[in-house]
Amino acid sequence: MSTRIITRNRVSLRWAEMIALFVGTPLVLAFLLPPTMMFTVLGVTTFAGIVLLHITPGFSWAELNRGQFDWRALALLGASTVVTSAIAVMVLMPENALILPRTQTGLWLMIMLLYPLVSALPQEVIFRPLFFRRYGDLMPAGSLIWVNAALFSLAHLMYWDALVLAMTFCGGLAFAWAYHVRGSFWLAVVMHAVAGQIVFTSGLGRLFYSGAV
């Protein structure tokens, strides 16, 4: 078998992997599985993604610690999320404003503590290093951040809410920028964690709760 055919087969395999992971999985979860399967699917997907990332030629886990942390970018992301969430809550569901810290403080504190580790970190491993390092050469460089944000938004299709899709697309752009442009995986993780904590604190977390679907 010629080198050209082997290369073509490897490229086709990576396309199949990417489509199955970033398109097929969200569609199956949205159309075929109950929302309560979200964390099970996230766990399985994270495990598969870690394996794929580990076997990606040229990748080293040590590179996740590279890059400088940008506190100004984090502050800007946090401020914009506060404003957006506050406006959305007051317009769409004013009765939900700060509902978790006001009425379920224990649950709110648990979410603040666990969200960065249980949700933000595994999602960032899949959507940032795995996507850009393993599949980044499959498409034009100028489209990568936009495609990544669109796929990140698609992963939230199971919530069936236009605001959720819009917010996760914008968030995806910011997180992808942090990783791909600024070169900081941990900046992307912290930005994701802070954005999620703000959303749940504001009252918009109801839209991201699988039991509300």
Image (tube, rainbow, N blue to C red):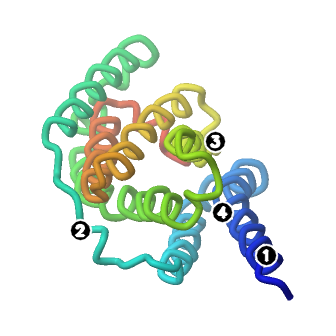
Three-letter code, disc 2: Asn
Q: Give me the C-alpha separation between circle 4 and circle 3.
A: 14 Å
Label located before the other in sequence (3 or 2): 2
- Point out the frontmost of discs 3 and 1: 1
Q: Secondary structure at mark 4?
A: helix
Q: Is residue 204 left or right of residue 138?
A: left
Residue 46 placement (x, y as % from top left): 51, 70
User: What residue would you read off at disc 2?
Assistant: 65
Residue 85 placement (x, y as % from top left): 34, 25
Q: Secondary structure at mark 2?
A: helix
Three-letter code, disc 1: Arg
Residue found 72% across the figure and 68% down from its top: 11
- Could you tell me which quadrant the C terminus lies in? top right
User: What residue would you read off at disc 1?
Assistant: 4
User: What residue would you read off at disc 4?
Assistant: 21
Q: Are marks 1 and 4 in contact (CB under 8 Å)?
A: no
Q: Give me the C-alpha separation between circle 2 and circle 1.
A: 35 Å
- Point out the frontmost of discs 4 and 2: 2
Residue 36 placement (x, y as % from top left): 59, 57
Q: Taking the image as drawn, is residue 107 in sight? A: no
Q: Please identify the residue farthest to the right as the structure is shown.
A: 1
Label located before the other in sequence (1 or 4): 1
Crowd around label 2: few <14 · some 14–19 · many ≥20 (10 Å): few
Label located before the other in sequence (4 or 2): 4
Crowd around label 1: few <14 · some 14–19 · many ≥20 (10 Å): few
Q: Give me the C-alpha separation between circle 3 and circle 2.
A: 31 Å
Who is closer to the viewer here, 35 or 63?
63
